[in-house]
Amino acid sequence: MFYLLGANMKENRRNARRWHLLLFLPVLDAESNEVLGYIADISEEGILLFSPTPIKLGQTFSLVIRLQDLKEASLDENITDERILFQATSRWDDIDVKPYFNRTGLVFVDLSPELREVIANITRNVADNLAWNKVPSL
């Protein structure tokens, strides 16, 4: 089960608010239905994906975030589709301080107005959860 434990807002050179998640949401490759990586942070322009293997740069991927993963993370309880399908292009990569994670920056491609609003809602819900009101009791 996923819990949103907190997030930090960071201004960056992309001029977009980027929200860092303290949990990782799985992202599936739409063609293979296999996990490509995990969202480490998100903005309305793109995502930072952590993955166990390198992701080819300059490639556009059809990606999926499952509805159930968003609900369990309390990021968006109002999504009615079973999944969010979107395209993103890999722009940069490096290796995390922990050498078993590859970090890849992906920019969203041709988001519809509806999908853009879903992404905006997710980023707003991350901000709303900064109060730590979703932390489970231990």
Image (spheres, helix red, strand yellow):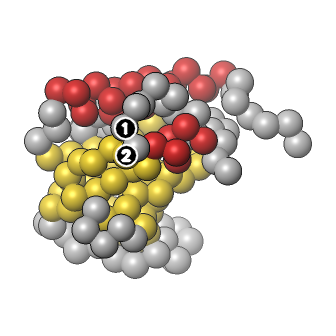
Viewer-proximal residue, 86 or 89? 86
Q: CA distance from mark 2 to mark 1?
A: 5 Å
Image position, residue 1 (x, y; %):
67, 50
Q: Secondary structure at mark 2?
A: strand
Please determine whether, in this image, residue 20 is positioned above or below residue 104: above
Image position, residue 109 (x, y; %):
14, 46
Identify the image quadrant of the C terminus: top right
Image position, residue 21 (x, y; %):
53, 43
The residue carrying mark 2 is 83
Image position, residue 133 (x, y; %):
71, 24
Q: Which mark is residue 65?
A: none
Query: Which residue type does callout 2 highlight?
Result: Arg
Circle 1 packing at 10 Å, graded few (<14), some (14-19), many (20+), is few
Q: Secondary structure at mark 1?
A: loop
Identified at 66% across, 42% down, the residue is: 3
Query: Which residue type does callout 1 highlight?
Result: Asp
Left or right placement of residue 59 versus residue 128 in this view:
left
Identified at 51% across, 28% down, the residue is: 77
Identified at 15% across, 61% down, the residue is: 60
Please determine whether, in this image, residue 85 is positioned above or below residue 4: below
The residue carrying mark 1 is 81
Q: Is residue 8 visible?
A: no
